[in-house]
Amino acid sequence: MQFSTPLVAGRLIRRYMRFLADVELDSGDVIKAHCPNPGSMMGLKDAGLRVWLERNDDPRKKLDYGWRLIELGDTWVGIDTGLANRVVGEGLAAGLVPQLAGFETIRPEVKYGTNSRIDFLLQGAGPDTYVEVKSVTLSRQNGLAEFPDSVTARGAKHLRELADMARARHRAVMLFLVQRTDCTRVTLAGDIDPAYAAAFHMATQAGVEVICYSANISAHGITLGAPLPFTQP
């Protein structure tokens, strides 16, 4: 996935009201940007952080900039949770996920469960396969990515619905995309959301598979990286 326009660099002033951020661009201009991340962004919202924004010319959007990346020394972090599905979708189409290759159709955003949509429904090679994608940006230990970074009742609901699919003898997959370049393994942040951890345990007991991948991140774009191991907490 390539960014549609060249990114613009600056320094974070503050992130507030969940979806807003004030940034001082390298030009000296201070602008307000959309923050496309509903989580806590623990460790990723300190004033002074080097950030990268994408400018848009869509008159329907209220803000001229969208926050996309953080640069932490040699580490890149992709904070736009909405891009995770695009990255995974491109990877699936290119056959870059061997565990999920060989399907005839890859359908995004298919209705299922109780007023939900599955991120991808794969069909045409064995049982229907339901794939839920989560973007991971939290890391509190060197090399260890954790999900979630805040309480997510919606995430627990998705796990319960995946478990229902597995019990119905469909294939159900939880795919964690780690949108930071300094992590080599993935686990749950059970101390942050014990209910999510409990739902995760129930889902895996029901047959839900867990797949984790890294992301290749630069100021030009984000692509699917290498598989990562999942570590039980």
Image: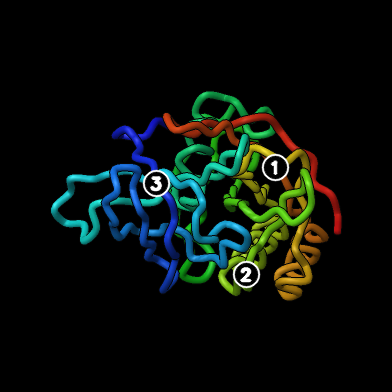
What is the secondary structure assignment of the residue under circle 2? loop
The residue tagged 3 is 10
In the picture, measured across the screen, residue 15 lies left or right of residue 162, that is left
In the picture, measured across the screen, residue 31 lies left or right of residue 132, that is left
The residue tagged 1 is 212
Q: Nearer the viewer, mark 2 or mark 1?
A: 2
Are dots 2 and 1 in contact, CB under 8 Å? no
x then y, percent, for residue 79: 50, 51
Q: Circle 1: is it few (<14), some (14-19), or many (20+) Cα within 10 Å?
A: many
**Disc 2 to disc 1, C-alpha distance:** 19 Å
**Disc 2 to disc 3, C-alpha distance:** 26 Å
Q: Nearer the viewer, mark 2 or mark 3?
A: 3
Q: Circle 3: is it few (<14), some (14-19), or many (20+) Cα within 10 Å?
A: many
**Disc 1 to disc 3, C-alpha distance:** 31 Å
Q: Is residue 105 visible?
A: no
What is the secondary structure assignment of the residue under circle 3? strand
Q: Amino acid at mark 3?
A: Gly
Q: Circle 2: is it few (<14), some (14-19), or many (20+) Cα within 10 Å?
A: some
x then y, percent, for residue 4: 31, 34
Would you identify the image quadrant in which residue 26 lies? top left
Residue at point 58%, 51% (across, down): 135
Residue at point 35%, 37% (across, down): 7
x then y, percent, for residue 180: 61, 42
The residue tagged 2 is 150
